[in-house]
């Protein structure tokens, strides 16, 4: 039981560090293999920002990010229409996300 608790605490610490850590260190995964957000960060508790990188051969047209608290309950959501062509990237910023109190997030791109 102690080993399980230590592993859980380690994973939770990693999540917290990735959300609150230095933006240069955070690369967030999305629902599509080959699409990531580098330098992903929460700014002023409301804005998600980063560089979206599309390594696929299909364009994407929007980014939806959901924020969750420590109980796994959704506490915020934001979407930005952002076209990113295949094999390219672009900077983005989206507000109204309520990310300051979030413990983890899910990113869906279309």
Image (cartoon, rainbow, N blue to C red):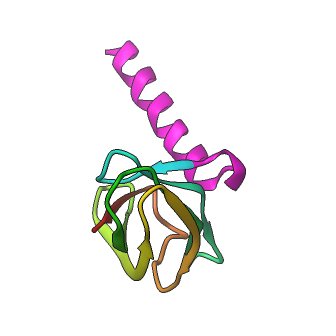
Q: Quadrant of the N terminus?
A: top left
Residue 90 forms part of the magenta stretch? no
Q: Position of residue 87 (x, y in %)?
A: 47, 55
Q: Quadrant of the C terminus?
A: bottom left
Residue 25 forms part of the magenta stretch? yes
Residue in the image at 45% along x and 78% along y: 97
Q: Main secondary structure of the magenta part?
A: helix
Quarter-wise, where is residue 74 in the image? bottom left
Residue segment shown in magenta: 1-26
Using residue 50 as the reference point, say whether residue 57 is left or right of it.
left
Using residue 37 as the reference point, say whether residue 75 is left or right of it.
left
Q: Position of residue 104 (x, y in %)?
A: 42, 55
Using residue 12 as the reference point, say whether residue 92 is left or right of it.
right
Residue in the image at 42% along x and 76% along y: 83
Q: Position of residue 72 (x, y in %)?
A: 29, 56
Q: Is residue 22 visible?
A: no
**Relative to the observer, which residue lies in front, 95 or 92?**
92
Q: Is residue 31 visible?
A: yes
Residue in the image at 41% along x and 60% along y: 86
Quarter-wise, where is residue 3 in the image? top left
């Amino acid at each position: 039981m102690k080993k399980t608790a230590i592993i859980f605490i380690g994973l939770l610490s990693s999540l917290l560090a990735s959300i609150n850590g230095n933006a240069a260190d955070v690369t967030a995964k999305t629902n599509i293999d080959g699409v990531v957000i580098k330098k992903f960060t929460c700014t002023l508790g409301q804005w998600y920002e980063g560089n979206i990188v599309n390594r696929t051969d299909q364009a994407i047209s929007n980014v939806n990010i959901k924020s969750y608290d420590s109980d796994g309950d959704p506490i915020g959501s934001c979407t930005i229409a952002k076209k990113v062509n295949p094999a390219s990237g672009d900077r983005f910023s989206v507000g109204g996300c309520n990310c300051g109190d979030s413990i983890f997030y899910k990113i869906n791109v279309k």
